[in-house]
Amino acid sequence: MKNFLSIKDLTRDEIIDILDTSCRLKEERKSSKTGEELRKKTLLLLFEKRSTRTRISFEVAMNELGGTSIYLNPADTQLGRGETIGDTSRVVSRYVHAIAARVNDHQRLIELAENSTIPVINALSDLEHPCQLLADLMTIREEKGRLEGLRLAWVGDGNNVCNSAILASSLTGIKIRVATPKGYEPDQEIVRDGRRLGGNITVTDDPREAVKSADIVYTDVWTSMGDEEEREQRLIDFKPYQVNRELLEMAKDDAIVLHCLPAHRGEEITDEVMNGPNSRVLDQAENRLHTEKALLLRLLEPETINTQIP
Ligand code: CP
Ligand code: NVA
């Protein structure tokens, strides 16, 4: 694997390997053990959209593996004056060892990757958010001890995170039921890809049907970055899709609630559920750090990752 643009760039076994390595790194961090595996390596973070978790977790990951990172907003680079993504990619390939890019249009990631000689990581595009799903799978496995056969209910927008959740579930044997209002369904090609990978995928407009007997209830904002002009209409369309106590009661008693964050409390999720006993949103956010370390090792120093798996 050179690039990580989609969760389906990994096989099931590669995902499991990354999760095992992430668990080891999480344990080692508790005893203040940090690595030097990425000494003298530099990650470029090229972000067209805002970020809290992704930027910080990648920067800390590089630091704790002995490397360094550079954060750039394209407006501050020559990209902002019209230098092409291809030229930029060919040039930065001569300086840094990997690029994590957050882009408005997934096509720009593809162009970046096609022109680079170094790994390109999708740090969120309009189509997918694969780094998020690595952390989510880790969180689910920590809680449930397995992935295969679990039921995940996605409630809300069929957006980038939902698309990656469909593919991640399909690859790992999680049964996914997606409930979105009509017109906000996940990408059809992603659903087809998921089914080709053996996925058990249901798409409905009924949130209660999706959540019934679920082991995991996952939601995300109703208005993603880039969709702001539609916000007023979306607030109306998504109203019946709020993850609240009443909806959560349809799930299994020990269901966990996930949200990739940032959340709009009181819209897609209530304070009560977000702060409640089923919520694992902070573990999810923490696990971004551990899974991104494992991903960076896999891309930059693959021979180091299979040591001391617990
Ligand atoms: N979940 C996530 O990617 O958060 P940020 O937008 O803060 O990076
Ligand atoms: N779907 C959200 C995820 C943010 C991490 C967005 O794209 O804005």
Image (cartoon, rainbow, N blue to C red):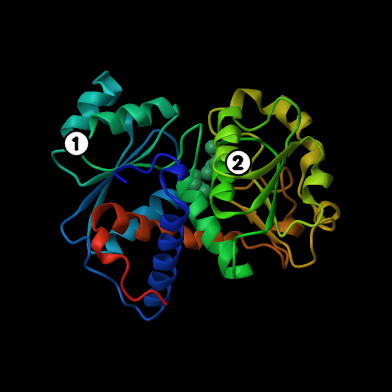
Amino acid on which disc 2 is placed: Cys
Q: Quadrant of the C terminus?
A: bottom left
Q: Is mark 2 within 8 Å of ligand 2?
A: no
- Residue 22 is left or right of residue 76, and the answer is right
Find residue 135 and report its horizontal and vertical position in percent: 50, 57
Instruction: In this rendered view, identify the residue nearer to me: 13 or 187.
Output: 13
- The residue that label 1 is drawn on is 92
Q: Is mark 1 within 8 Å of ligand 1?
A: no
* Mark 1 Cα-neighbour bin, 10 Å: few <14, some 14–19, many ≥20: some
Q: Image point 66% across, 59% down: which residue?
A: 149
Find residue 233 and report its horizontal and vertical position in percent: 73, 25
- The image's mark for residue 162 is 2
Quarter assignment of residue 120: top left
Quarter assignment of residue 251: bottom right
* Mark 2 Cα-neighbour bin, 10 Å: few <14, some 14–19, many ≥20: many
232 up-or-down from 6: above or below: above
Instruction: In this rendered view, identify the residue nearer to me: 197 or 237.
Output: 197
Find residue 142 and report its horizontal and vertical position in percent: 56, 69
Q: Provide the secondary structure element on which disc 2 rests.
A: helix
Q: Provide the secondary structure element on which disc 1 rests.
A: helix
Identify the residue at the far top of this view: 82
